[in-house]
Amino acid sequence: MTPSIPELTDRARDVFRLVVEAYIETGTPVGSKTIALASGLNLSPASIRGVMQDLENAGLLAAPHTSAGRMPTQSGLRLFVDGMMHAVAPTSEERRAIEARASNAGPVEEAIAATTAALSGLSACAGLVLVPKREAVLRQFGFVPLGPDRALAVLVGEDGSVENRVIELPAGMTPGGVEAAANYLSAALAGRTLSEARRRIAAEIGEERARLDRATRALVDRGLAVWSEDGGHRPVLIVRGQANLIDPAAAADLDRVRGLLDELEGKEEIARLLDGAREAESARIFIGSENKLFALSGSSVIAQPVRALDGQVVGVVGVIGPTRLNYARVVPMVDFTAATLARLLS
């Protein structure tokens, strides 16, 4: 059974903390001589080796291969994160970098993606954010003919976003009918979300207030149908900075890195993991095999809910990186990013 912090002697706590901090900084096993030279503990290397052996027997440290050095186990990292870590607030430069990306003009999703990229760059991890797909307020709807029986339906949002879908034209559709359908849809959609416009159009057609012939009405139905009803509810997962996962230390373990990148491609699984952090009061930290998704790649995830001003959870933001990531620095950075995104999404 892994001991708790109070069960460790003062000497064991000091040595354990120094080993973990040195390992997080270098990514390599830490030897007793390194601790003796850098710590100021006034302990000989032999004494430190004895303490490290005790910590290894307790399941907090491990000696990989034949190395004389030690590194924290997953249980050791959990003990350190939960009971010994001293959080370091983001610097003013780091805060400005995150806030600047969030204030970018343009579609909200672009600002979210830019903010996630800033978090990725500052943390040297891959940045993750899960947010609900926002229904854009619409400005214009048009059809671009692609041939006698097909057209491109173009939906333009007030925020400048554009979505395109190819649709089949109803039989007997004339150019005038296509234009009439586009004009009618633009008038019905302008200033509304798609779901709001659908309700209005359904009411007008049901009450026969929409003066459309059969073919034009069919085209209106098809133009709306290409955007699925659940589009406004399906969450959007944004991943930025995967390249940060291939650092010099990881290059020696390419199989692990490949496995991690494969896991990031499975966005549905990542989305479920992040969604599991929605009810947390603060950051949730998953270390290695604590989450089965990353059991093989040996990665850690820090995830924090994004709460709007009214307290409602509107998303989850986080990072993924090696288990040796700098938790003391990255956890507050994720927290600050969550607060920044909360203002953006409120």
Image (tube, rainbow, N blue to C red):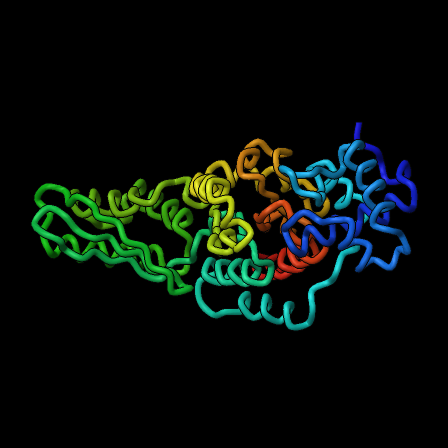
Asked whether residue 267 is in view, the answer is no
Q: Nearer the viewer, residue 20 or 203?
A: 20
Figure check: 328 above or below 170: below
Q: Quick one: 280 or 225, which is closer to the camera?
A: 280
Number of marks in the rendered image = 0
Q: Which residue is located at x 86 percent, y 49 percent?
A: 14
- For the point 41% across and 56% down, the residue is 192
Using residue 127 as the reference point, say whether residue 303 is left or right of it. right
Quadrant of the snapshot with the C terminus: bottom right
Q: Position of residue 106 (x, y in %)?
A: 44, 67
Residue 343: percent from the left, percent from the top?
A: 62, 61
Q: Is residue 115 left or right of residue 328?
A: left
Q: Report if residue 338 is visible in the image.
A: yes
> In terms of depth relative to the viewer, which is nearer, 103 or 94?
94
The answer to whether residue 10 is above or below residue 1 is below
Tell me the quadrant of the picture where the N terminus can be found: top right
Image coordinates of residue 248 in percent, x first then y, are 53, 55
User: Residue 199: x percent and y percent?
Assistant: 39, 45
Residue that lies at the very extreme toward the top in this rendered image: 1
Whether residue 338 sits left or right of residue 171 in the image: it is right
Residue visible at 57% across and 33% down?
295
Out of 140 and 276, give the one closest to the viewer: 276
